[in-house]
Image (tube, rainbow, N blue to C red):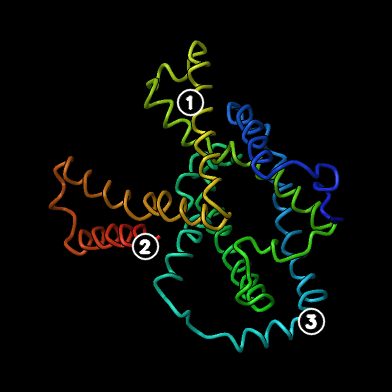
């Protein structure tokens, strides 16, 4: 069968699992690198790939499928029901992905360490989150108008595999390959400190043990990739891991520190109720996902 997919034209007999295994083999040495300045170029590559993906998807929907311009998407949106048939399933199937995108607690220190002026972190994150939120809301509404109930977890899957789309997907893959080690760094450091101890983790003599820890963690990620589509994995990781970091750990730490320092009485009743409410919300949404 003739295909327009660039990768399949040159590697027609390679299975999906083989590509995933090859990606894991590439990620292992990249995840062992500790100088993140070598990944600086991926920031521009990532912006280019994501913006390209948005523009290609919108152009495809406006001109090809379903075509007819933005008016078709807007009219389609007007006919969609305001609420899903099941609020619980819709919430459980989407909240984790939203957390995955916006609850970036685990990325705080890697981002700060890679900034020229770390003191500008708060302002930079606020602007970035606001901008990403606006773009994602507009883009998701238009994509839903184009493809309605057939909208895929990764909307690029709604597009046919032409040469330009294939090239764009390759750019996104390259960007993710070089972004993975940065996102992975916090978890890797936690594992190294827990297994080796803070002092031994930084010694040259521990490099083989550190490599084994990285290999085990990358293998775990490969196992998670077998669960299903991108949306399922993003929802699982976002809802359970990042939801816990964003909504359960902060109030738990605040309450524990107030008790440990003997300042529990200084915490106002309203503040304490608020902390417990946030933690309860985190447990609830984590269970829903």
**Disc number at residue 44?**
none
Callout 3 secondary element: loop
State the mark number for residue 69. Answer: 3
Calculate the distance from the C-alpha at mark 1 to the C-alpha at mark 3.
51 Å
**Left or right: where 75 falls relative to 219:** right
Q: Which mark is residue 288?
A: 2
Image point (46%, 71%), residue name: 90
Q: Residue at x 75, y 81 (%)?
A: 70
- Seen at 75% across and 65% down, the residue is 159
Q: Residue 37: image x %, image y %?
A: 65, 32
Q: Are marks 1 and 2 in contact (CB under 8 Å)?
A: no
User: Which residue in the structure is indicated by mark 1?
Assistant: 213
Front in this rendered view, residue 76 or 85? 85
First in sequence, mark 1 or 2: give its number.
1
Contact between marks 1 and 3 (CB within 8 A): the answer is no
Please state the horizontal and vertical placement of residue 209, each as a whole percent of the image.
Answer: 48, 18
**Which sits in the foreground, 152 or 282?**
152
Q: Position of residue 39 (x, y in %)?
A: 67, 36
């Amino acid at each position: 069968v003739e295909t327009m997919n660039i990768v399949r034209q040159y590697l027609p007999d390679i299975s999906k699992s083989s590509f995933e295994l090859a990606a894991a083999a590439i990620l292992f040495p990249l995840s062992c690198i500790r100088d993140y300045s070598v990944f600086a170029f991926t920031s521009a590559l990532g912006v280019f790939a994501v913006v390209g993906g948005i523009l290609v998807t919108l152009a495809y929907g406006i001109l090809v499928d379903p075509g007819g311009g933005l008016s078709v998407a807007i009219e389609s949106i007007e006919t969609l029901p305001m609420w899903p048939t099941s609020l619980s399933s819709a919430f459980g199937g989407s909240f984790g992905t939203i957390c995955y995108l916006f609850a970036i607690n685990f990325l705080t220190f890697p981002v700060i360490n890679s900034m020229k002026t770390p003191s500008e972190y708060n302002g930079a994150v606020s602007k970035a989150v606001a901008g990403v939120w606006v773009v994602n809301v507009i883009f998701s509404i238009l994509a839903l108008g184009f493809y309605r109930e057939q909208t895929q977890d990764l909307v690029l899957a709604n597009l046919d595999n032409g040469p330009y789309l294939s090239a764009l997907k390759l750019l996104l893959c390259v960007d993710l390959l070089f972004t993975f080690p940065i996102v992975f760094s916090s978890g890797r450091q936690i594992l190294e400190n827990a297994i080796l101890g803070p002092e031994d983790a930084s010694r040259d003599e521990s490099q083989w043990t550190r490599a084994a820890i990285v290999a085990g963690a990358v293998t775990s990620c490969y196992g998670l990739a077998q669960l299903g589509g991108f949306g399922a994995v993003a929802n699982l990781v976002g809802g359970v891991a990042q939801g816990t970091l964003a909504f359960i750990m902060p109030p738990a730490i605040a309450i524990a520190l107030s008790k440990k320092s003997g300042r529990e009485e200084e915490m106002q009743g309203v503040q304490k109720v608020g902390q417990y409410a946030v933690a309860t919300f985190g447990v609830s949404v984590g269970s829903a996902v």
